[in-house]
Image (cartoon, rainbow, N blue to C red):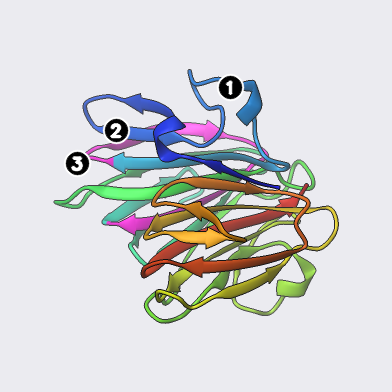
Amino acid sequence: MIERRPFATLGAFHNEWLNAKHHFSFGHYRDPARAGFGRLLVWNDDEISSGAGFDPHPHRDMEIITYIRDGAITHRDNLGNEGRTEAGDVQVMHAGTGLVHAEYNREKILTRLFQIWILPDRAGVKPGWEAKKFPRAGAGLAVVASGREQDAGTGALPLYADAAVLAGTLPAGQAVEYVLAPGRALYLVPARGAVTVNDVAVGTRDGAAITDEKALRIVPTEETELVMVEVAA
């Protein structure tokens, strides 16, 4: 089954510096039909104004992946980690036993990002933070973060979860074949551009929740920057 979730139907939050869309229940947005997707609990589509951001706040027992679409975000946490993650980069935060962090847009332009939360396979892991640059243009889909055994040694940022985040830019018409093993599910979002997934049209910043589909044929109808998360169903 492929369930398209149009961008216009997503949950929303807006204030003077943040324009956010929620693919799943988050904050004051609650939809029982969209209360996570397997171990994927949060997919926020955030636009953060220049000079603003999220003040220090805590997390625990969560894998938090930030995919930067435009601009950059500056991370700082109570473990002493600090770094600037720009468009083309991905950062992963292991909240584990507890971590306090802040994320600010120190740029002169709007920062756009996806923030993705995945429930780890076990609680109480050592907290940490990592960031890495991944090629986008012409690189196709790459595994950028993963806890799957099959992705060990690939250079993907590690996750404490049996899940994988894939991303990349696909030229128009270049089909991608993707196989889902039994008991696996996939959620995908075109950051820009549009695709068909087994002939179901998915537009820019729409979501597609995919279950009980073994073979997927993903075809970009224009040049498309695509982000996907595979989890246990």
Q: What is the x, y in percent for residue 130? A: 52, 61
Q: What is the x, y in percent for residue 197? A: 58, 60
Q: For residue 69, what is the image quadrant? A: bottom left
How far apart are the two marked residues, 3 and 1, measured between alpha carbons?
A: 32 Å
Three-letter amino acid code at the position of disc 2: Leu
* Magenta stretch encompasses residue 54: yes
The answer to the question of whether label 1 and label 2 lie on touching residues, with beta carbons closer than 8 A, is: no
Q: Is residue 98 above or below residue 72?
A: above
**Of label 1 and label 2, which has the lower sequence position?**
2
Q: Which mark is residue 31?
A: 1
- Few, some or many residues within 10 Å of mark 3 (<14, 14–19, 20+): few
Majority SS type along the magenta span: strand
The answer to whether any part of residue 132 appears in the image is yes
How far apart are the two marked residues, 1 and 2, measured between alpha carbons?
A: 21 Å
Closer to viewer: mark 3 or mark 1:
1
The answer to whether any part of residue 82 appears in the image is no
**Which residue occupies 61% across, 30% down?**
34
* Magenta stretch, residue numbers: 48-70
